Image (spheres, rainbow, N blue to C red):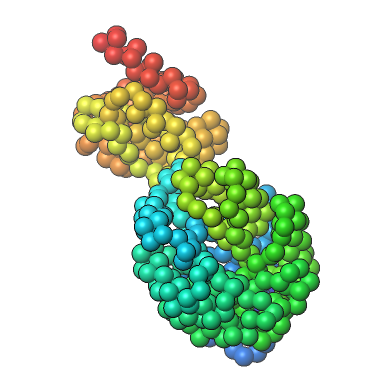
Amino acid sequence: MLTGLQIQKLLPRTNCKECGSNTCLAFAMKLAAKKADLSLCPYASEEAKRVLGAASEPPVRCIGLGKDRSLRVGGETVLYRHDKTFVNRTAIGVNISDTDDAAAIRETLDRVCGYVLERVGETMLVDMVSVTNQGGDPAAFASLCARTLEAAGRPLVIRSADPAALVAAARAVEGSHSVLASATEETAGPLSEAAGQYGHVLAVTAPDLNALVSLAGRLKEKGMNDLILHFQAHSLAERFQTNTIARRAALRENFRPLGFPTLTFVPQADLLEETVLAVSEISKYGGICILPSFDAAQLASLMTLRLNIFTDPQKPIQVEPRVYEIGDPGPDSPVFVTTNFSLTYFIVSGEIENCSISAWLVVPECEGMSVLTAWAAGKFTGGTVGKFVREIGLEKTVSSREIIIPGYAAQISGELEESLPGWKVTVGPQEAADLEGFMKARAGTR
């Protein structure tokens, strides 16, 4: 294992930033931590490629999907989220088949394209569409893949047991950097050529883990690095065990043949059983998880779980520090203040909406901390809140000179009044759920 300084000596040291890092040293540190690939450096020498090529690869290769490679899978460096963080979320896709009714296919694609889930400031979409070949016409299958790519506007998982159908579909969606699923020992040769020629990623499969290791290892030796592993498991327990063995081998033993993202097709079953299988994939190292059909409630549950797992535990989810409009506030609408921790913001804004009023919500920079935590850390004080209110020029927007602070931060009221001369500071309830009663009581006393 080379250190960052040792790796830097093999780099051009021009600090060109074309690799995405500000300096060659920063890029070298990423290589040492196996968070980057040497191919990102356009000026790496042959010596650097020879010495660093294998050593600098992340233990689980990061693969970009889609025309712009923006959907990333793999690239993980830890077994457990709390060790550091997981990086690239499990891609969730929905399957259609070339034997489905044309109207049913259009309906599924419309629902996939129209599905948007918002959680704590993040917008989540269905990542992929899988097209399965069950008919006997390669040309019709290829045509369906082309139409699906155009309609969905996202990478595909092209699935067929017929290599001729896969090659035809790969040609029809050339350059989309989709996934061809799945090459076997017998079909790996022509399918790897098609994947390379038409710009796709190749999924490989085998009856057991040993055979899959052998196949992936041979393809990697031939220079085929954009691979995805498709394990054949016959039960939830076997799937869970295989995923864990592969990830441990890649991370702990640096075993390259298993250092690739994975692909799983959830079989058609009872909705609860399907969801349990998908939950297992998201929780235990799944790279791509394809659902057998579209179900909005199921997607909401899976995406919320995925958001929780792939959130960096060292970095709280934050919203942008600024003044938010709740409803349609006017100059005399009430002014509230809270921190920029996403959960706090959405709870407070939601409770203000429940009051059936329009209001201004001032959200200063608090490094994503909750009210009590930010106050204890000195990030939510009368001075910092007052300075933020002055900097954003709130007095030019509102005629009211009253600001309502959280009850848990009542201690900052005096300092805030000193920081904002002419303003009245009102201490609100401690719990956001009590805002409705608080506002009704205020209205009753006026």
Lateral position of residue 9 relative to residue 140, left or right? right
Q: Residue furthest bottom?
A: 46
**Along the viewing direction, whichever of 305 and 120 lies nearer the viewer:** 305
Residue positioned 40% across, 21% down in the render = 435
Residue 20 appears in the rendering: no
Lateral position of residue 72 relative to residue 59, left or right? left
| Location of residue 189 (image quadrant) | bottom right
Residue 104: x %, y % from top left: 40, 56
Q: Quadrant of the N terminus?
A: bottom right
Lateral position of residue 61 relative to residue 392, left or right? right
Residue positioned 79% across, 71% down in the render = 210
Q: Residue furthest front?
A: 136
Residue positioned 42% across, 24% down in the render = 413
Residue positioned 45% across, 60% down in the render = 100
Q: Quadrant of the C terminus?
A: top left
Report the number of numbered marks: 0
